[in-house]
Image (tube, helix red, strand yellow):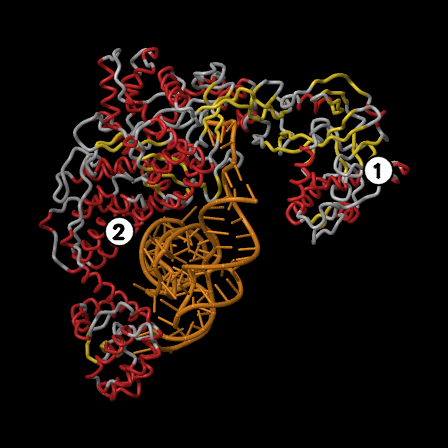
Amino acid sequence: MNEFNLVQIDKKWQKRWQEAKIFEPKPEKKEKFYLTAAYPYPNSPQHIGHARTYTIADIVARFNKMIGKNVLFPMAFHVTGTPIFAMAKRIEDNDPEMIEIFEKIYGIEKSKIKQLTDPKKLVLYFSDEIEKGMKRIGYSIDWTRKFYTFDGHYTKFIEWQFIKLNKQGLLEKASHPVPWCIAENQAIGAHDTKGDVDPEIEQVILVFFYEEESGVYFPTATYRPDTLPATTNIWINPQIEYVLVEYENKKMIMAKKAAELLAEQLELKILQKVDALKYIGKKVLNPLTKEKIPIFRAKFVKEEVGSGVVMSVPAHAPYDYVALKNLKEEEFKQVKIVSALKTEEYGSCPAVDLVEKNKIEQEDDPRLEELTKEIYQKEAHQGIMLAKDFEGMKSSVAKEKIKEQLLKDKNGILIYILANGPIYSRAGNICTVKIVKDQWFINYSKKDWKEKTKLALENMKIIPQKLRPEFEYTIDWLEKKACTRSKGFGTKYPFDKSQVIEALSDSTIYMAYYTISHIVKNKDPKELDEEFFDYVFLGINSKNKKKWWDECREEFEYWYPLDSRHSAIDLVHNHLTFFIFNHVAIWPKKYWPKQIVANALVTMEGKKMSKSFGNILPLIKALDKYGADLVRLAVSSTAEIDASSDFSESIVEGAKTRLIFFYEILEKYRGQKPKDKKEDLATKLFYSKLHRKIEECYLHYQNLELKQIAQKIFYEMYNDIEKYLKTCPSPYLREFLEYWSLLICPIMPHTAEEFFEKLGEKYYIENSEFATTSTYPKADKKQINAELEKKEEYFQNLIEDIQQIKKLSKIENPKKVIVIVAGNYKYKIIKIVQENIQEQKKVFEKILKEKEFEKYKSNLFVVTNKIMKNISQYINFDLNQNKEIEYLKELKEQLKTACLAEMIEIIKEEEVGVEFAKKAINSLPAKPAIIFVG
RNA sequence: GGAGGGGUAGCAAAGCCUGGUCAAAUGCGCAGGACUUAGGAUCCUGUCCCGAAGGGGUUCGUGGGUUCAAAUCCCACCCCCUCCACCA
């Protein structure tokens, strides 16, 4: 049995399933089960991480099929948005990084890559690859319902969704800040930027310093208005170009570049170039303190950051202090460094102290950046104000107060900046923040909508359970979600055709679309108008109704509501919550979804998978190496659903050896017939355990406790078999094999089929064409024997003890082994201890009172102490002396083999002679004294 | 800043909700042995410390508390990870 064979087996069964069309369900009388997993975005081949969600969904699908339901598990492709454009462009530009990823990580041939410069081709290439992968891993997907979100039929459906939302007043138009590239005239996301930086937008205040003489303002952007009281001067950089601009009837001076960037969000008019040098040395008014402070030059000021003018707070800002020290003597003299706030750790002038301590002299010293961050963090959290009017106030409070006051007095305005800037687009253009005027939103903040959504959530099953509060929180917290973009694949926004509906908004109710996708794909999209969807999805009658509409309506009514939605855990905050919101907005309660299953990530040998680590394992590669079933097992069942599961070679290899073991068992025992089954102890015990596990696994499947299942059917059963084979001279495994082939079927369907076929006619389970289509096995409860399992446990413990004693006694082949069962009074002591477990102090009292204990007085104390000390072992103890002796007699033969002894003698402590009396005292219930006679 | 998850033996990872059967499953690693031409294959044994009779001692981030009993419950602290929206 090698890998090659596993792959062959996979393909054989996938072909047969496909030919038999067992995954293409139609509405019928049977109870249905409808589930979906997030459709993939085809901009890369799948890796094993993607496979986790789908595998779990597939296990749910297959399990439900096996418990008799009509299961629908469809799949489509999410082709919405811009990343795919950016990718195609990079390929066209021969971007070496991109080409390397395609070649090295994705394993695509160079000649093939060159053909992928068209976004559509790229989409089709990857979606084909993904589809192949999903087939190759054996998902029970109904491919007849496949669609792409950019095709005309689907976009009509999304259009309908937005018309419905709009009629309920859930859509709004407003302005909105977005990261923006002016040169390319588009919004940018992480995938559009150099180095894949995710742009973060942050609001800061622009403070206006007035220069009276020429009547102009110098605006400075700052995170820290709380340091305004300690501002000693402002900086401009004579090496950059400054311009005069007009903003709300104020004349202002700022860097030309900064003005151009800010013009995307403010109504700025750039008037003319100005000579910045002439302002150096002039005084401006600090709008908070009303002090007059000078304008000086500094090299560190950048033209693209903020306004290109900077306020100087040398006590708290390392850059400012260094720049100040670099000034001419007579300028430096004008400045008196003051402090705005203090912290315990750094005192009142941390910038001065740290710069001096580190002996920093140059304005471009990289350490300045670190120091700035360090001081900012400490002061923002722990700072206490020193400045007058704010003394004793927390700096975070003062910051807000000062901000408010500046805004009120029109001495400042709020602007957006890129907090992690500067950010450049892939083409190298600098990015800024633009206020998009005609941005459309879905307004998730409506109270009644939120309430309805919560009601839906209450009635849903969430797996894992602990995510429920997370959903509740998200429902409360969601406000407005921008739902349009200016570019990208997708559906044109019906109320502004220049806009496209973005990806998280066009994927909230598509589960409904699957129910009819296989029918509508043969129609002209034009036919899919509002009336059509109203009829199919909402049951609103129409005089234009066509016959095929009823077919659609029937499918929808049969399959809806959705029984299970599968996704990754990180989509709780957006997609999964939107999914609930939009369903409740559009449909009445009976169509609201019933369950969400969200799983954690897959890591690769303990590390997060990422392109930059280069540790992405493409699914196809893994499948070729290990076969479908081992990959399915590894990604789905090696960790609980809410914990990240690690894909490591050693785990998969380990699983492989087990799998091979089971195949060997199959070959060796499949020829057995029921008449071969013996009624010996070992066999009874083995089947008692098996049927108990069958029963337990059913519940585990219901609750998706996949790790438990894997543990039981793959590891524990393996151990059980090994033990069984050792202890039973004529083991019978035929029955096991039949049950096992179905138990593993949802997780490892190919192996299941292979077993099922090789077993031929079944004696214990239902006969059927496929394992996949047969009924999940029911445990034979008559074979579950708790007493027997208890005995087994007793025996195991005893053997362990014996082996240890034997080792210590150094008697290799004892003539005789004497087993002394504890005296009856010791069992009674246990009872008393159990009864007085809450008040152990009373135990001795009670024991001393008992008359029958008197003759054991000498060791009563020792025995009781021992029992109390090991109370944990005796808490549920229910053996009595006779029963223990009975057990021992039954096990006599086995004990002989275990001890390698010729003779076993079993006696009660009460009957023991003087010779062994001392040892006998050591005996305890379930722990007989054992004496080796050499 | 907000929200969530987590810290268990050399490593990985169960156990924690529902306290006792926990010196703590399982896998890997390591050591010794068996088989073998050989072994990276398989099997057995061991793997916190001490111990020539099944025992004793000390452990589950740190420090307290509750309890007859704490890895498990409560409180405080330290550390690590993830997510925070217009991006699929």
Q: Is residue A691 left or right of residue A840?
A: left
**Residue A818 in view here:** no
Q: Is residue A517 above or below residue A138?
A: above
Measured as percent of width and height from the top left, residue A20 is found at 20, 26
Residue lying at the far right in this picture: please name it.
A330
In front: A420, or A827?
A420
In front: B22, or A373?
A373
Helix, strand or loop at mark 2: helix
Residue lying at the far front in this picture: please name it.
A409
Q: Residues within 10 Å of mark 1 (few under 14, many from 20)?
A: some
**Residue A841 in view here:** yes
The quarter of the rendered structure image containing the N terminus of chain A is top left
Q: Are the residues tagged 1 and 2 within 8 Å (C-beta)?
A: no
Residue A586: mark in rendering: none
Amino acid type assigned to the residue bearing label 1 in the image: Asn
Q: The residue marked by circle 2 belongs to what chain?
A: A
Q: Is residue A506 above or below residue A727?
A: above
Measured as percent of width and height from the top left, residue A243 is found at 76, 21
Q: Is residue A900 above or below residue A496?
A: below
Q: Which residue is mark 2?
A: A717
Q: The residue marked by circle 1 belongs to what chain?
A: A
Using the rendered view, name the quadrant where residue A195 is placed. Answer: top right
Which one is earlier in the sequence, the residue at label 1 or at label 2?
1
In front: B16, or B1?
B1
Measured as percent of width and height from the top left, residue A141 is found at 29, 29
Q: Please tell me whether mark 1 or mark 2 is closer to you in this view.
A: 1
Spatial separation of the CA atoms under disc 1 and disc 2:
77 Å
Q: Residues within 10 Å of mark 2 (few under 14, many from 20)?
A: many
Measured as percent of width and height from the top left, residue B29 is found at 44, 53
Tally of numbered discs: 2
Q: Is residue A585 left or right of residue A433?
A: left
Q: Which residue is mark 1?
A: A326
